[in-house]
Image (cartoon, rainbow, N blue to C red):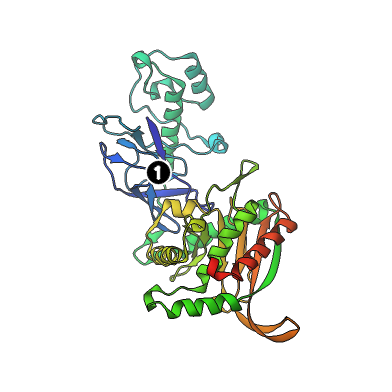
Amino acid sequence: MSEFRMPSLGADMESGTLVDWRVKPGDAVRRGDVVALVETEKGVIEVEIFESGVVDSLIVQPGQKVPVGATLAIVRGDGATAEVPPTPGPPLAAKAASDEKRLPTITPPIEAAGRARVSPLARKRAQELGVELSAATGTGEDGSITAADVERAAENAKARASTTAPAATVTAKGLDLQAMRRVIAAAMARSKREIPHYYLATTIDMRKSLNWLAAENAKRTVTKRLLYSALLIRAVALATGEVPEMNGFWIDGAFKPGHDVHVGVAISLRQGGLINPAIHDVDKKNLDELMESMLDLVNRARAGHLRSSELSDGTITVTSLGEQGVESVFGVIYPPQVALVGFGKIIERPFAADGLVGARPMIEATLSGDHRVSDGHRGGRFLLAVDRLLQEPEKL
């Protein structure tokens, strides 16, 4: 038996509102299935499950707002047979340990525990958490109350308090942009406060890439043509293979390298605001697959049909403001990632090569790096790798 919890859909998310369930008790689920819709300040997200099994019970009901980490459902492991679940009580919620000091006053018990036996550890935990033993339902041998039962009772009480606050970030008129700007600002303030940024920039000659792209697109139908942004994203993904410190997360005071390369793409929403979903496994996709994934992601982001894994799996972010006429961008790292690559617009500039000076299409690439994980030397090698890869576009 395991608990399916409210996932963190980005560093700027503290809670979400369950909009709808896509499953019911007794349904078999497989890892990656969409099981729920959750509303956040950035829209309604399709939430995937990360293990296979059978849905035993749904703890949270549609319309309830719960914090990140709250238990949404109970899932039995593979091969288990689901029983008809009892009517679920109020939702459970498991917030971070740092929030323990804000435990609300425990409300009257849902179900009396009677004369059930209580383990010594459970009695101790009840005293620590301020939980009445009568509020806990025993799941141990012969209905005895365990420490886990006490902790669930405490979570239950916290959830009842947290679900009373309304959360309407998506209205009939669309996204609540003020709420979105608040969460973006909170995430960026955290980033600048906690991450010791360093910044590097280099100018890359795009002549070979653009010439190759023009020749390649001449062979294709309009719908199959490639954009140069696909070359940029692919080059960034492959460069992380040479400098792996740029791909991963800073979690619990240590760097955790990404096992795959999921490139987050900063997407500006038409109604305003910004979102940063990831394209999965960019290092394993060819340019056609990458182009298809990129267009699909942008369309779904602007339509509000993203999946939870696309918002939580990014290992490095790419942002490009060239279409807005920006020549260079020095971005703020999106925690817990440790690097962000920015690209400006392509500009014809004087360039000296082989003793001759001529005009070349140039783009400025920048790197925002986390000094806890890398330094200017490694960051310089990373930008050099991106440059080198863009000089051989046929190999991307």
Amino acid carrying label 1: it is: Thr
Image location of residue 357, percent across then percent down = 72, 86
Whether 333 is drawn above or below 22: the answer is below
* 393 vs 10, nearest the viewer: 393
Whether 370 is drawn above or below 111: the answer is below
Image location of residue 71, percent across then percent down = 41, 38
Residue at the (48%, 60%) spot, across then down:
179
Whether 344 is drawn above or below 169: the answer is below
Evaluate whether residue 370 shows in this view. Answer: yes
When asked about the image quadrant of residue 201, the answer is bottom right
* Residue indicated by mark 1: 163
* 201 vs 122, nearest the viewer: 201
Residue at the (45%, 25%) spot, across then down:
148
Image location of residue 188, percent across then percent down = 60, 58
* 68 vs 35, nearest the viewer: 35
* 86 vs 336, nearest the viewer: 336
Image location of residue 24, percent across then percent down = 26, 41
Within 10 Å of the Cα at label 1, are there few (<14), some (14-19), or many (20+) other Cα atoms? Answer: some
The number of callouts visible is 1
When asked about the image quadrant of residue 367, the answer is bottom right
